[in-house]
Amino acid sequence: MNETLRKFIETRDRRIAKTGKCTHITTLMEHFDTLIKHGQVIVGGRTSCGQGNMDPTWRVFSAWIQVVDKAKSLGYGIKITPITHKNSSPTRNGGFWDENEYTIDSLNSGA
């Protein structure tokens, strides 16, 4: 993995860990490792947690989008495919679930 990208991911993982609310959620580094090892990963999050609180999954999803943007700027070829869910109503806890499938384009992947 590119050293610049590794440090970028580690910094965001530390920021997420400081909230203390995401201990049960897959780290950004784990998501990226899955993407590299398996060629694809699905990452998503709930847009809100009711009463104006940010859902921990959304915090991770937002940081993941930053990681993907950084990876792409460093030469990784990553295709993003939005996943549409049939229900248009919010989840049981409020908020809408949003997720994408990320696929490595092996012809353009950087390292």
Image (cartoon, rainbow, N blue to C red):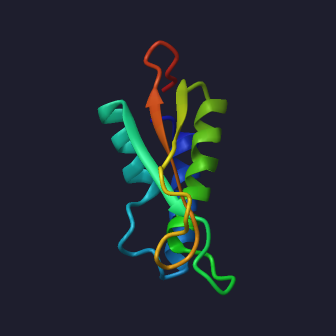
Hey, which quadrant is residue 34 in on the image?
Answer: top left
Decide: is 1 above or below 104: below
Q: Quick one: which residue is furthest to the bottom in this view?
A: 51
Question: In the image, what residue occupies the spot 58% across and 71% down?
Answer: 95
> Of residues 46 and 18, which is closer to you in this image?
46
Image coordinates for residue 89, horizontal then vertical, percent:
55, 65
> Of residues 57 and 66, which is closer to you in this image?
57
Hey, which quadrant is residue 50 in on the image?
Answer: bottom right
Image coordinates for residue 88, horizontal then vertical, percent:
56, 58
Question: In the image, what residue occupies the spot 52% across and 24% down?
Answer: 110
Image coordinates for residue 29, horizontal then vertical, percent:
42, 52
Q: Quadrant of the N terminus?
A: top left
Q: In the drawing, does residue 4 fall left or right of residue 85? A: right
Q: Quick one: which residue is furthest to the top in this view?
A: 107
Residue 11: tell me if it is visible: no
Question: In the image, what residue occupies the spot 61% across and 57% down?
Answer: 62
Residue 100: tell me if it is visible: yes
Decide: is 16 above or below 70: below
Q: In the drawing, does residue 45 fall left or right of residue 69? A: left
> Of residues 56 and 89, which is closer to you in this image?
89
Image coordinates for residue 22, horizontal then vertical, percent:
45, 74
